[in-house]
Amino acid sequence: MHPVSTDEVARVIRIAAAARLAVWPFSAGKNWGYGATMGFREGALIMVLDRMDRILSVDERMAVALIEPGVTQGQLNTYLKTNGISLWADCTDSTPKGSVIGNALERGVGYTPYWDHFAHLCGMEVVLPTGDIVRTGGGPEGSRTWNLHKWGTGPYLEGLFSQSNFGIVTQAGVWLMPTPDAFGCFLCEVEDEGNQAALVDTLRQLVLRRVISSNVHIVNDVMLLAQMIQYPYDMLGGATHLSPDMRAALRRKYKIAPWTVSGGLYGPASHVRGSRRLIKRELSRFGRVTLLNDRSFGVLSALTGFWDRHRGNSVVASVMPVLLRASIEKLGVIRHIYPILKGIPGEDIVGFAYFKSRRGRPKRDVDPARDGAGLMWLAVACPMSGKDSARLVALCRDCFESHGLDLSITFIMVNARTALGLVEIFYDKDSPDESARAQALYDTVTDVAERDGFPQYRTSVAYSDRILNRAPAFQQLVNALKAAIDPADVLAPGRYGIGLR
Amino acid sequence: MHPVSTDEVARVIRIAAAARLAVWPFSAGKNWGYGATMGFREGALIMVLDRMDRILSVDERMAVALIEPGVTQGQLNTYLKTNGISLWADCTDSTPKGSVIGNALERGVGYTPYWDHFAHLCGMEVVLPTGDIVRTGGGPEGSRTWNLHKWGTGPYLEGLFSQSNFGIVTQAGVWLMPTPDAFGCFLCEVEDEGNQAALVDTLRQLVLRRVISSNVHIVNDVMLLAQMIQYPYDMLGGATHLSPDMRAALRRKYKIAPWTVSGGLYGPASHVRGSRRLIKRELSRFGRVTLLNDRSFGVLSALTGFWDRHRGNSVVASVMPVLLRASIEKLGVIRHIYPILKGIPGEDIVGFAYFKSRRGRPKRDVDPARDGAGLMWLAVACPMSGKDSARLVALCRDCFESHGLDLSITFIMVNARTALGLVEIFYDKDSPDESARAQALYDTVTDVAERDGFPQYRTSVAYSDRILNRAPAFQQLVNALKAAIDPADVLAPGRYGIGLR
């Protein structure tokens, strides 16, 4: 069901509680890779909040919006642009149809200095599992700081409603970033696969030193290929996955590196200039550093467009890769990433989900959940340290190897000291054997990583039961809170393992 | 009692719960102005954690320490300096003997980019009121990211233990700042009292634009005087407080402005240079802008020392104020503030608490709680906006006027969008009449501000009962959580109004 108001949500919850019917709420239902709108058990009421899509206010001066959970990242960005409001909303690289609040509550991350979406929520209206409506933040009704003062008065409770099943957030304040004075982005193509550890240490230092004030992404070759092309089944020749030689050949063909780093630069012009210099100095030893701003990106886009239109021309096809030191496919990815670094969402990047689909990927209306694209991913928290991240890569490599699949991994900084290791498992959904291996690999990597001290960062609805069971005291506390807030166990029972006994 | 270990804390809590004896825990007991170690009701067990003062680890590479609640800000800073660790711990301008964890849990703020102390806690060990011991953050025991991944796995529960009575934090990770490449600070002396609103709007923009990446403080003339001198009782001539003319005369005498702004600059040299230029450009229209770095501060210190040693010399006494465009007293404050901006705590600033003490202020071992200095303060959250902050000043001015006391107010940025308005009520504790007026003023300002939409930011133990009662749904939720976590109501019952029914 699709309620239209907070009161309707509260009424439904009260009726469901009385009838002991479980309710599974979803903001927009685009939590791809983590379960989308899948209920954990049979017989639950699915509540999608997509009709609660009002942007209730935007205060340009204070740089904050108050929105409902059905507001999508595409909608919010269009609203800001259409109304000439000089604020940027951070976005993920997933679909523009994803919910801003839903992503923040699941602790999703984007690209700008406001990348930590949960950190930039402030002030919530929540329907509790009893049907009561509460505003977080303490303080009097009519408070001037509900959406401005992050921690509120008294205990900070907003964390309770994130990665959990304690309430349905029906409104939230979202901090937005004033259009920065200057913007730029950097790429570094790391030539030596073995330099990954040193790279991570260097990036951490750059962030701790405040040279970089935003998120950085580090993708391996397979993940970058997934954004560029369809899986090269023709290369396999009987193997189930690409050998190191085949990967090297693909890197040469598409002019990509074993690891590619990207990030944005935001702030006063003097800061952005200074950061460009320091990044060039620190990262050049790892490989080619490319710095882009709106002007150079414009030139690059024009050249890429020209190249695209004249692909058949043999002169163009031989000159352009040399001139730009890139492949048309790689430039295509840069063209898609650049707007996202400025908070403008697009559906092209998430097309990587169709990497191993034998039916190809759609040009528009990308929806891997609907289309049954063969991708699972799991995300673990990893120290933003060379040693730890190298350990995680080694663990994953062994697991992928033994399951006959291609290691695809992305490190996404969630704060200066932690990255989430996003492990993408691409598989051919039309192959029952490969699907089974992918499933087994998911379980193995989760287990192996957890045993080695890399906790889950966020989990799929289908794997809720395993998220907390290695921390029994924490699980017990969370269960006690759940019982107090949701005595009838009506709201998403078992989500994130909460309430499972 | 003063436990020495987590296990001892847990044992005491279990015994107290069985005996239905309330336990009031304090980290170091220096929560001056907010109740220090005062229990809310008679007959409670006071537990001070000052013997749990181990610095368990400092990881310089990841810039994080794991400490116990008895560790003071002075101790942590000395440890870092003595061991040659290139990390700064943010500190408040209160006593070096204050607890790092205690201050963070009460949402205290300092001065550097790590000023929001609660935001920089990561990973807690907590003794619950049942005596159970839990680690926040979810994930497996032995997790590599316990002190690195802020939100943990599953619901983020650390907020529960802040400004509350849900548990006793016996260990916590504290993020530290790598020594910045460059450092500087700025002062702006705002000549026209009426420019306060425009100033606040300008400062907010500078912070949102990331020109300033740390906290800013805005103090009015009375608060600055309190840091410089003893109360000028001789000026009163029968009045109970200073008239506008008297304040103006004092400003002229001590060469201070109606409002003074201060803040630090931290980061790569290019960023600090760029920020200095932009701050000078934006703030010069309000009054004199002074920029300091270690070199100019050294010169200033030397000149101030010379002046101090030759105070009796009439040439020095007439030349120096003109040369430095300052009073020796104002320079004294700058000398005390500058190290705090670099994370080095000192006890001089908090000497302002003795402003109206007729016995003067101690040169060292400052302890206003012990010495019965006449100061109460209350802190309200205020949007970092000119209009709202001017409204708060006007409300406070009327209240102070009608109670015959001097308006002293400091705006301290708690995030780019919110300031805490710290309203200091200086009074002569030896005067029963003035003490009664001070008390009445505290109540009045709290009421008036709250009715006007300025919620309490943090409150005194003595005023716990009023903190949440204007938000009944929030109070009800908090009470339900309290009942679940602390069924015997053993831990600091009624603190922050929690559990009061």
Image (tube, coloured by chain):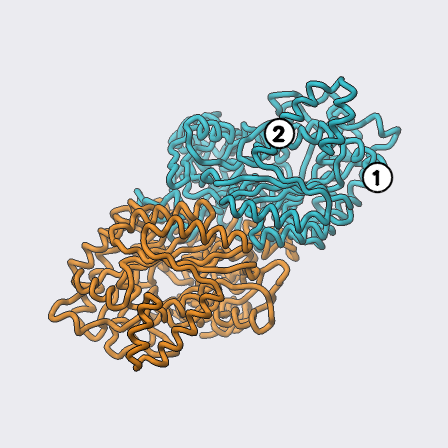
Chain colours: A orange, B cyan
Q: Position of residue B246 (x, y in %)?
A: 84, 34
Asked whether residue A434 is in view, the answer is yes
Q: Which residue is mark 2?
A: B299
- Alpha-carbon neighbours of circle 1 within 10 Å: few (<14), some, or many (≥20)? few
Q: Quadrant of residue B303?
A: top right
Query: Up-down: is A488 above or below B463?
Result: below
Chain at numbered mark 2: B
Which of the labelled discs sits on residue A134, or is there none?
Answer: none
In the rendered view, does B476 fall on the left or right side of B427? left
Image coordinates for residue A259, horizontal then vertical, percent: 30, 57
From the top left corner, tell me how far across and down residue B247 is, in percent. 81, 36
Q: What residue did someone put label 1 on?
A: B244
Nearer to us of marks 1 and 2 is 2
Q: Amino acid at mark 1?
A: Pro
Decide: marks 1, 2 in contact (CB < 8 A)? no
Out of A440 and B160, give the one closest to the viewer. A440
In this rendering, position of residue B343 left or right of residue A385: right
Q: Is residue B499 left or right of residue B440?
A: left
Q: Are marks 1 and 2 on the same chain?
A: yes
What amino acid is labelled 2 in the image? Val
Give the Cα separation between the discs numbered 1 and 2.
35 Å
**In what quadrant of the picture does the N terminus of chain A appear?**
bottom left
Q: Is residue B329 above or below residue A218?
A: above
Residue at 73 percent across and 50 percent down: it is B390
Secondary structure of residue under mark 2: helix
Residue at 40% x, 55% y: name it.
A216
Within 10 angstroms of label 2, few (less than 14), some, or many (20 or more) residues? few
Residue drawn at x 47%, y 30% as measured from the top left: B76
N-terminal of the pair, mark 1 or mark 2, is 1
